[in-house]
Each structure stands twice: as structure tokens, then as C-alpha cells.
Amino acid sequence: MSRVLVIGCGGVAQVAIQKIAMVSEVFEEMMIASRTISKCDAVKAKIEATNSKTKVTTATVDADNVEELTALIKDYEPDLVLNVALPYQDLTIMDACLAAGVHYVDTANYEPEDTEDPEWRAIYEKRCKDLGFSAYFDYSWQWAYQKKFEDAGLTALLGTGFDPGVTSVFVAYAKKHYFDTIDTIDILDCNGGDHGYAFATNFNPEINLREVSAPGSYMENGKWIEIPAMSIHRTYNFEGVGEKDMYLLHHEEIEALGRNLPEVKRIRFFMTFGQSYLDHMRCLEDVGMLSTEPINFNGQEIVPIQFLTALLPDPASLGPRTKGKTNIGCIFTGKKDGVEKKLYIYNVCDHQECYKEVGSQAISYTTGVPAMIGTLLVANGTWRKPGVFTTDEFDPDPYMEALNKYGLPWKVEENPVLVD
């Protein structure tokens, strides 16, 4: 039996929390902590109205404050911490886990809130020059904790959402069961859902818009190739959704997969977008609303993208409005027993079915369920070894079994249509 501390109570967190409570045979106790305790209390009440046997408590915490986090962890004494707060807070929560001696799990890699910070900027600009990609988020900051977690005998599991997370497990599973060598990987993320708003994002607007408006990049022959934002466009016919326009983006699992599977010749990531979303985003970018640099407005300092986030619909509120399906997976080429092979491993998820189960849309569901699964595998010792790891570095079979069991069943298609 395990005790888990969940930090964060947004849309993804609320799914992960409810799914954890459904596995009370493993998670005997859970604390939910965030800046806004009313959100935590609301989810606690929702769980207590079910037949879950997991004991739930709540707390207020500032996830930017290492001392406050450490004190909470030491007081509650969990077996592990699930970080479903903001990527800005990954390092402070990792520091607190080390100080308190508990395992760490998250869904997205670190990025700074202040991209103009001189100390961070110097390291960032050197990385851009040395490695060749300019995304604000990368794994290097968390990989730097490898020895600290090794020495402490603790596990840090990074990026157990869907992408990254499930997609990286799909890669490990394909390598273990279907290929002797993998030549190319195309990760496809299709959201065919319609929420009825002129413009809204399916997860944290600030993180989402930063990601989408940044230059795209992919890895080829061990090197990064960077391209202007949204400049590579393809159309693909997705099961359950239909034909959709998709665009090449930089995405964090490419970095981890490129490091851990250096033999793969090319790794790309594509995400679908409708024309209305792109038009709104370009307009907002043109007028400076996606800027992370503070400006003075009527004597008050504001960050434009944070102000925009306050104006946009809360992603956690999209559940009852969103209809349609998502389709997310990986297309592989490679060889098995000397013969050329193509394979597609993917999941189709229905927005309305997710809402019926946990009151969320499928984007939060497809991230929150894997967050629970990664937490479960660390908690029960199945995925546990000292150090800092991404999901492709463990045996994929228990994770794949859990996906089928807990709401994200996957399919395997032989000889799929490739992305040119």
C-alpha cells in the first residue's frame, strides 16, 4: 500500500487524482496540494462521493518554494510525489523530493517561466548553439539531477503523460516486440474534438501557445534540424477522426528518444490544428500577446501571455462542451529478421466518454491516466531504480497492460500509410 502526494489541481491533475482513487488497493492514502485549496477540496468531495477506499486529504502549497514543499512532504511522509503542476516548477519539486527522500514523477519537462532571466538565458543560448534547437523546454535541466537521485536511491520518472509518456512507451514496445532495428519514428497527435469556442486551448494556454508558436524541429541522423514554426504541413487520415491537417512541431520526447535510441535515423512529431486556431494564434502573436517579457500597463507590470491565459476558457471547463475523438500514436519503419517492416501503434479516445467517466475532455484524460499509471508503477516497485529516467527506459509491457486496463486501449496496425 502506498501514500502519494499530488501537487497541482488543474485539468490533467483532476483526472490523475480520480484515477489514483480508483486504484485504492495500491493507493491507500492521497494528499492533493495546490495554491488553490478550494479546487483540491472540490475534487476530494467528488472522490468521497464514490466507493473509493483511498483516504484523501488536501493542503495549500506554493510549488515555487522549495522549503515550503519540503516541509509539506516531510510532514505528510508520502512514498512518492506526482507533479502535475506547471513545468516551471519541476526543479523546485525535484529539489524538495531529494530533501525529503521520496520518489518523483511528472508529465512534462522543465521550462523557465522567465525566459529573459540572464543566468538561464546564457545556458540556453549556449545550448542552442551547441545542439541546434531553440525550444525553451528541454531535458538537460532534469537530467542534471541523475547523480543526485542515484546517490539518494530515489527514482525520478519524467514525462509520463501521453506525449511524452505513452508515445515513448509505444517506441519501447515496438522495439521489444516488433523490430530488430527501427529506422524512423513519426509521432502523430490528432485532436478531432470540437469545443464550440472560437479559440481555446486544450491544456494550459501559456504552455500550449509557447509550444505551438516556437520553431519546429526534428532529429535526423543524430542531429537537430530546425524549421520556421508551422512550415512543414501534412494531411493524414486518422481512424475515428478522418482527414486532418497536421504540422511538424518540436516536442520533448524527440530529445529523450534521440539520446536513448541513437540508431534511429529520423524522429518527427506532428500535431493537428484547424485553420481557425492557427489564424487566432498568428494574430495574437503579431500583436505581442504571446510574449513572455513583462510590460508596464497603467503602472502595473504584466506578462502578455499570462494576461491572455486569464482571458481564455479554462481547459478544465471544456469537458461538457467537447465532442469528437483523439487519435495519438507512433508510426515506425525498420527491419525484423532482415525484412523491411512498417507499424502503427495508437490510441483512439472519445471526448464524451471521458467526460462521463471523470468529467474531463480527452486531452486531460489522455495525459492524466498515464500520469496515474507511471505513479502506480513507481509506487508498486515495477518501475523503480535510482536515477532520472523517461518512460522508454523501462520494460514497456506493464505500462501497456495498464493502458488497456485503465481506459486507454491501444491498437497495432501493420503496413500503415506513411507520412512522406
Image (spheres, rainbow, N blue to C red):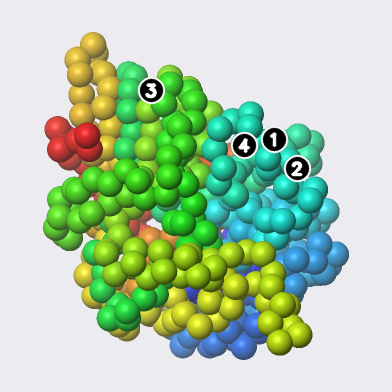
Residues under labels 1 and 2: Cα distance?
Answer: 6 Å
Residues under labels 1 and 3: Cα distance?
Answer: 25 Å
Residue 385 sits above or below residue 120 on the image? above
Task: Point out residue 264 in the picture as x, y percentages from the top left corner.
Answer: 40, 24
The mark nearer the N terminus, 4 or 3, is: 4
- Disc 1 versus disc 3: nearer the observer: 1
The amino acid pointed to by label 3 is Lys
Instruction: Answer whether labels 1 and 2 touch (C-beta < 8 Å).
Output: yes
The residue where tag 3 is placed is 265
Q: Nearer the viewer, residue 218 or 344?
A: 218
Local SS, label 2 = helix
Residues under labels 4 and 3: Cα distance?
Answer: 21 Å
Instruction: Answer whether labels 1 and 3 touch (C-beta < 8 Å).
Output: no
Q: Which residue is found at the position 47% from the left and 65% from the top?
A: 286
Q: Which mark is residue 122?
A: 2
Local SS, label 1 = helix
**The quarter of the displayed image where residue 34 is located:** bottom right
Local SS, label 4 = helix
The mark nearer the N terminus, 4 or 2, is: 2
The amino acid pointed to by label 1 is Lys
Q: Which mark is residue 126?
A: 1
